[in-house]
Image (cartoon, helix red, strand yellow):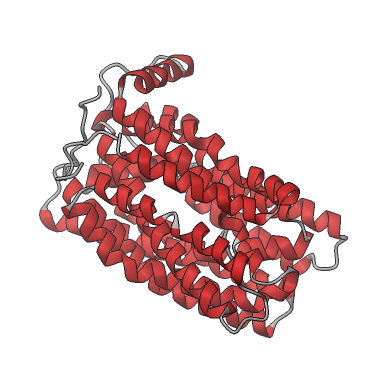
Amino acid sequence: MDGAGSTAVDNGQSGSGANGRFWRFIASGVFFQGGVVSVEANTIVSALVQGLTGSPLAVGVTAAITRYGWLFPQIVVAYLAQRRERRMPFYKFGAFGRAACLAAIAALLWFGAGLPGVVMVAAFFILWTLYGFISGVVGVPYNDIVARSVPSSRRSRLLALRFFGGGILALIVAGAAHELLRRYSFFPGYAAILSIGAATLAISAVFFVSAKEDPAPLPAHAPKDFKTFLGQGISVLKEDRRFRAFLYVQWLAGAVSMALPFYILQVAPGERAIPFVGILLAAQTVGALLSNTLWGWWGDRRGKLSLLRMVSALNAVGPLAMLFWMAFGSANSPWLLPWFATLFFVIGAVGNGRAIAYIGYLMEISPDDRRPAYSGYFNALIAPAALFPILGAGVAVAFGFATVFALSLAAAVLQSLALLRVPKTSGGPND
């Protein structure tokens, strides 16, 4: 099992048909990136929740819901999808469902501004939890359908093009968000931003569904029930060294990410941060956009593992820069906006590279006939790491934000060291 690789095939399509599917995946990804920036956890949502609650703990909980909701459902979806030749129905439910949830949150903010604060916050968190967990249904079918349709040598390129085009659209959305928050009051401004997100996510789903899928190969020995399926996951964890080592690395990545929701809170307290949200979101988007060509080339030419090592090393830049600012900067400094804009530029670039490397490496180590299962096992096992932002919020309340960023920096160093022990694959020169 340790040596099982993955090689995508064209599933009998003609070259033009495969190419058309390739570009539909990219179009879907472009609109997804444009839509998801409207609920970007490190800027838009952190500022929104801080404005609603005034609580760093609530900000951490919101980020944790997003990540945990994305990861946890995938073990169940993987079990169900692995038993079926068609995985697109799962994608449809998750993709259109999350767009509907965003539309509902936008309606809540637009029409519920007069509600008592506790009712508004409770309704928001109920809808946000639904959004997070319904979104998680998408992960397994997306990875499987793309990996079966696009050969390994083109996957990093696909992801880079998706993030590049999506970055341009996200930059437009970020500009719109800045204008909306500048022109309108708190509730209408955020309602309009989330409405844009719901619309673009719905368009993304339409493009992906239009690409269709071919029947998937079923495993030779499909598990007869969910308990057997989980038992096979334990076997994968014990026997597949690459899978196990990658799991450790992603746990450390979760510890690095515990600080991400709190960068925006260091710019200015409460609603005073709102004028900065659109600018910093744009800086983060530009960082992701301009780094795409490098990450796409690196992943396809030098290998997914090499890319993982590069972006993991760069993970230390964010917390290190934040600690430096907290020691020597001030809210009245003329360098406030340039410093944070540069910081968010780096966060965007590194986050984009991390996403391309993570998706590409997981596809690489997953056998063709068990890819949904591997995705489900892996994401379920790293799901608890998604709760680190709650831990980060607790640490911030007890010991201050500097401690959170120091812990994030330590995790980044440990992650880089752990990646040196991750075995190579056959997917690239350094994999």
**Residue 156's image quarter?**
bottom left
Residue under the point 18% across and 38% down: 7
Q: How many marks?
A: 0
Give the percent coordinates (x, y) of residue 197. Answer: 54, 65
**Which residue ends up furthest to the left in the rendered image?**
15
**Which residue ends up furthest to the front in the rendered image?**
328
**Residue 272's image quarter?**
bottom right
**Residue 11's image quarter?**
top left
Q: Which residue occupies the foreground of this view, 242 or 154? A: 242
Give the percent coordinates (x, y) of residue 225. Answer: 45, 16
**Residue 103 visible (yes or no):** yes
Residue under the point 24% across and 51% down: 155
Give the percent coordinates (x, y) of residue 249. Answer: 40, 38
Location of residue 305 with respect to 281 vertically, above or below: above
Location of residue 263 with respect to 126 vertically, above or below: below
Q: Which residue occupies the foreground of this view, 174 or 222? A: 174
Give the percent coordinates (x, y) of residue 233. Answer: 40, 22
Residue under the point 73% across and 69% down: 269
In the rendered image, the quadrant that contains the C terminus is top left
In the rendered image, the quadrant that contains the N terminus is top left
**Residue 88 visible (yes or no):** no
Location of residue 4 with respect to 273 vertically, above or below: above
